[in-house]
Amino acid sequence: MCMRRMIASGVMVLALASVGFAAQSYRERAATPKAAPRAVEPKEVTKTPSHAGMVWCNTRSKVYHKEGDRWYGKTEHGQWMTEADAIKAGYHEARHMTKE
């Protein structure tokens, strides 16, 4: 019986020690200052054409938008091209020309 108590108390000591260790490491982690999150800079996209007559080509949908179109220069993925270059590259004109 004495041996069982020693084993049981040893297990209890180990359990309490591990809880104390976990609490201590938690306090240490809480005390250390956290680094400020880095600001993520948005990708800079030129939203104005370099010269008149350019179309905005959405590189994901392969659609180009003319001036006056709702999405002219506003899609997230795109680039400026001449209309002839856009057609050569496989882009097609947007079907709905809606004003803003």
Image: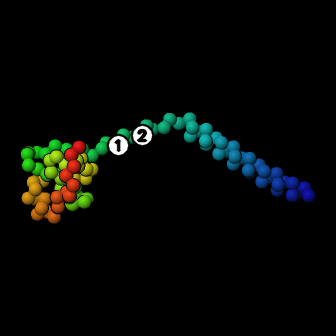
For this view, does 22 lie left or right of residue 55? right
For this view, does 33 lie left or right of residue 46? right
- Packing grade of label 2 (10 A; few <14, some 14-19, many >=20) is few
Residue at coordinates 56% horizontally, 40% vertically from top-left? 29
| Badge 1 vs badge 2, beta-carbon distance below 8 Å | no
Q: Is residue 9 above or below residue 27?
A: below
Query: What type is the residue that disc 1 sits on?
Result: Val
- Packing grade of label 1 (10 A; few <14, some 14-19, many >=20) is few
Marker disc for residue 71: none
Q: State the image quarter where residue 94 is shown.
A: bottom left
- Residue 15, horizontal then vertical, whole percent: 73, 50
> What is the residue that sits farthest to the right in this orientation?
1
Residue 95 vs residue 62, the one in the foreground:
95
Q: In this view, does 32 lie above or below 80?
A: above
Report the label total: 2
Q: Name the residue under label 2.
A: 37
Asked if one can make out residue 18 in the rendered structure from this viewpoint, the answer is: yes
- Residue 8, horizontal then vertical, whole percent: 82, 54
Residue 50 vs residue 38, the one in the foreground:
50
Residue at coordinates 19% horizontally, 52% vertically from top-left? 97
Asked if one can make out residue 57 in the rendered structure from this viewpoint, the answer is: no
- Look at the image and tell me in which quarter the N terminus lies: bottom right
Residue at coordinates 14% horizontally, 47% vertically from top-left? 67
Query: What type is the residue that disc 2 sits on?
Result: Pro
Residue 30 vs residue 50, the one in the foreground:
50
- Residue 81, horizontal then vertical, whole percent: 12, 53
For this view, does 96 lie left or right of residue 15? left
- Look at the image and tell me in which quarter the C terminus lies: top left
Residue at coordinates 11% horizontally, 63% vertically from top-left? 88
Q: Name the residue under label 1.
A: 40
Label 2 SS: loop
